[in-house]
Amino acid sequence: MSNSSSISHFLLLPLAHTRQLQLLHFCLFLAISLAALLANGLIISACGHLLHSPMFFFLLNLALSDLGSICTTVPKAMHNSLWDIRNISYTGCAAQLFLFVFFISAEYYLLTIMCYDRYVSICKPLHYGTLLGSRACAHMAAAAWASAFLTALLHTANTFSLPLCHGNALGQFFCEMPHILKLSCSKSYLRNFGLISINVCLVFVCFVFIFFSYVQIFRTVLRIPSEQGRHKAFSTCLPHLAVVSLFLSTGTFANLKPPSISSPSLNLAVSLLYSVVPPALNPLIYSLRNQELKAKLWRLITGQFQKH
């Protein structure tokens, strides 16, 4: 038995137990991370030239959070697969947990704000410039990042202040809060319950806001007389709705799946689904339906090829 003061490192869940599969996982992670870096980098470059629009300003912030989340978990997993190790230092684990919660929370808050942007754009178009001016957008983005920072700080401080006496092996390929709490021998149920309750309330409030905003959006769109107008309105909402659905469905299944179907391989697959897949797919989802963004991305890509 050991406590947290004597733990110098944690053991992460290996992605595979044979050398061939480890190298295969390394190559897959490398391909996914390069695709995510390239796609989100292009989104950031494109949106940097389109900051006059609130939608592109928030999309830039979303791309930054996607880059941050995938760069928090994937490099260490690639390193461990390549060198056939499992170790992560105690401070490295704390930093990874903080950054992962920070970027995931920021993404959720930003998606909520982007829902408000779509609501104002479709339901209150005459007030769009007033409600979503540059100052208001900057304040909302700052509030999202600040809230994410406080959320991450609170959860990281709580997690690593608990004594750990059930070994140092984590059932996850990165440092995730539920798996660290399983190692705890603390009886601080009230404190943990309080933090979880606050987190659930925040998630639920954002979800309710998104749900009722889309109810109002769809009611407004269906009242548009022309089919072309309805199609245009839907095309601006569908990418955001797809990203929100992917984010919430994967995260909800990962945290609420029945214990009866839990297994190391399934847990690994689900964790990959909600921690790695969304940051790689979000740029593709947004660029497919947005003509202005596609045109800007095409000009950026062709411009780089012409230079070379």
Image (tube, rainbow, N blue to C red):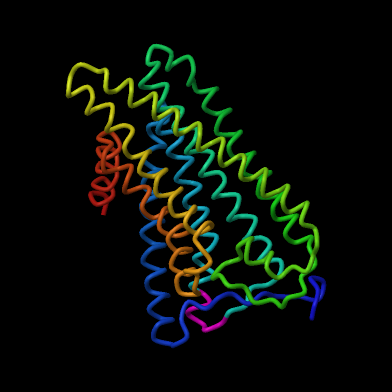
Question: Residue at 38% across / 74% down in the picture?
Answer: 27
Q: Is residue 215 above or below residue 87?
A: above
User: Considering depth in this image, is 41 or 106 the residue closer to the camera?
Assistant: 106
- x, y percent for residue 259: 53, 66
User: Considering depth in this image, is 289 or 304 the residue closer to the camera?
Assistant: 289
Question: Residue at 61% across / 33% down in the picture?
Answer: 143
Query: Does the magenta segment cover residue 84?
Result: yes
Q: Is residue 95 above or below residue 194?
A: below
Most extreme residue toward the top is 126
- x, y percent for residue 247: 44, 49
Q: Quadrant of the C terminus?
A: bottom left
Q: Quadrant of the N terminus?
A: bottom right
Mainly helix, strand or loop, the magenta region?
helix
Question: Residue at 33% across / 20% down in the picture?
Answer: 220
Most extreme residue toward the left is 227
Direction from residue 57 to residue 11 in the image, left or right: right
User: Considering depth in this image, is 249 or 285 the residue closer to the camera?
Assistant: 249
- x, y percent for residue 57: 45, 33
Question: Residue at 64% across / 39% down in the picture?
Answer: 147
State the extent of the magenta-drawn residues as a range.
Answer: 79-85
